[in-house]
Image (cartoon, rainbow, N blue to C red):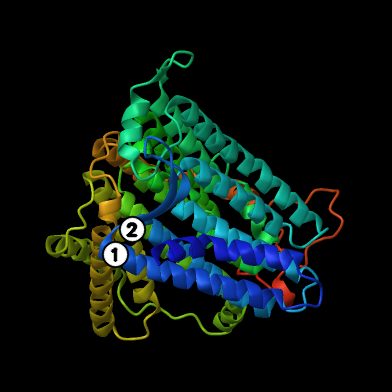
Amino acid sequence: MTALLLTAAPMVPVVAAVAIALGRPGGPSPARWAVRATFVACAAAVGLAVFVWAEGPVSMVAAGADGTAAIGLYADRVGVVLALLTSGVGLVVQSFAARALRGDLRERRFFALTALLTGATTSVALSATLGLLAVSWIVTGSALAALVAHRGKWDPAVRAARRVRRSFFVGDAALATAAVVTLVSVGEIDLRSLDVTANALASQRIPALGTDTLTVIAVLLAVAGVSRSALVPLHRWLPATLAAPTPVSALLHAGVVNGAGVLLVRLAPVFGASPTATHLALVAGVITVLYATAVMLVRSDVKGNLAWSTAGQMGFMTVQLAVGAFSAALFHIVGHGMYKAALFLGSGGAVTAHLRHRHRPAPQPRTPRPVRLATALLVPAAALFAAYQVVDPHLPTAGDLLVVVFAWATAARAADGWLRAAPFTPMPTVVLVVAGTVVAVFGYVAGLALFEGFVTPALPVEVPAAVSPTVLGTILAATASMVVAVSLAPGKRGQRLRVRIYAFLLSTAAPVPKPDDQRAPRGSSAAGAVLAPADRGETILREPARPPRRSR
């Protein structure tokens, strides 16, 4: 029974993709085939998760003479979590697309590719060997690039697909090279016994590079993750995918762009044993968080804002991996994937909400500014301190530091927004905000602790090469100091610096179309940003970001 479930989760969508591609025009609905196949895969993933939780990991492999896997599938607690995410999001997105793309001339092609993409991403989560994982990884990237070009001959879509292929080629080549090097050095990597493989790789050296094989493999894995998760410097492909239909964007942001997390969590014993790889991931993650988040703040369209937000979130996830907080990174992958898929699928409704908001008088803050600032800054900190006294997520020290800073900043901003928008008098407003903040913080920490308890048996207990709390704390302090210095720089020089930064970010967020564009997009922002054509005529504009005020 378990072998059937383990096979059905990745294979049923692939079989459906082949059937849709070979089906005759006018035959059974391709949407119905894809949705039903993905539903079967999702149900198999649910059954597999229940069995793994109750009985332990299951595998179905063809073993070699030494007992290691030559090829096959393997499900532990990390694998079933990822399989549930990919198949569940695939089911929701394909159900949405069955209505949104009804009558589309390339409907059959779309559903064949989405079914293939769902099966391939699930196979990445459940592969028992590095070779099968690498093949599934490459198929996932190829299917996504083809989906980005869904709009046929529309030039921005063609250019976007070309950019995706170029960026993915770097990561795919790195992962393929890692698979070949390990095959030559120690044979095929059996993902069921990565600790043994990591020790074997560490004991071998590559004289030409002057380092051990483990470091080379770990760095190649980090490069593959940087490419797939749109981290600097391989980040430009993600904003380009706005030329794809909204269902493609939802599937991409929920199940494909988190490739760094999926790959490095599944190969955590190898990646976490190399200081070079962990610090490389740290640098790429920190730069991406700062840059992508800043660009997100000046985007004037809904989907573009979400795309750059995803890049920033992937940077934060990669920093979590670098400090050894693998369970927190996996928790972030699941939460961000479901949240961002819902936002993309609801992006059309954001226009109506925006217009309603514009015609509604802006609420005037009724809570005094000192009270508002004190509540927003101090209440989340106190709630986090109390939550950690009650519930311990059992993260490494650097992971605790990162989670606390992230949770505090998020809760502080949310509390300030509630205090500004609440129409009540100050006392009821403060009471409600305090209660809501405490509940949210305790819910986040408790959820992280429960999730960590579930996936811990499938993750390494110690990460020998994780980034130290001192390094992470220094980076966080330097980043905060830089932001404060730029924001509070006095005089005309400070104002010119802020305006230049704003102009740079705005030009990054709003690329000018090339002269060879055959057709202009249907809408552009007030800042000149080129927008992807909206599905079925939906408009996706937001209020343009305002430049910094001039100092008097």
As helix, strand or loop, the secondary structure at mark 2 comes to helix
Q: Which residue in the structure is indicated by mark 2?
A: 77
Residue at the location (40% across, 78% down)? 421
- Asked which quadrant contains residue 100, the reply is bottom right
Inspect this view and state whether residue 544 appears: no
Q: Give coordinates of residue 449: x percent, y percent.
A: 23, 61
**Label total for image:** 2
Q: Is residue 100 above or below residue 479?
A: below
Question: In the picture provided, is 198 more to the left or to the right than 457?
Answer: right
Inspect this view and state whether residue 223 appears: yes
Residue at the location (23% across, 77% down)? 435
Q: Is residue 492 above or below residue 14?
A: above
Q: Quadrant of the N terminus?
A: bottom left
- Amino acid at pointer 1: Trp
- Amino acid at pointer 2: Arg
Q: Label 2: how many residues lie within 10 Å, few (<14), some (14-19) or many (20+)?
A: many
Residue at the location (40% across, 70% down)? 46
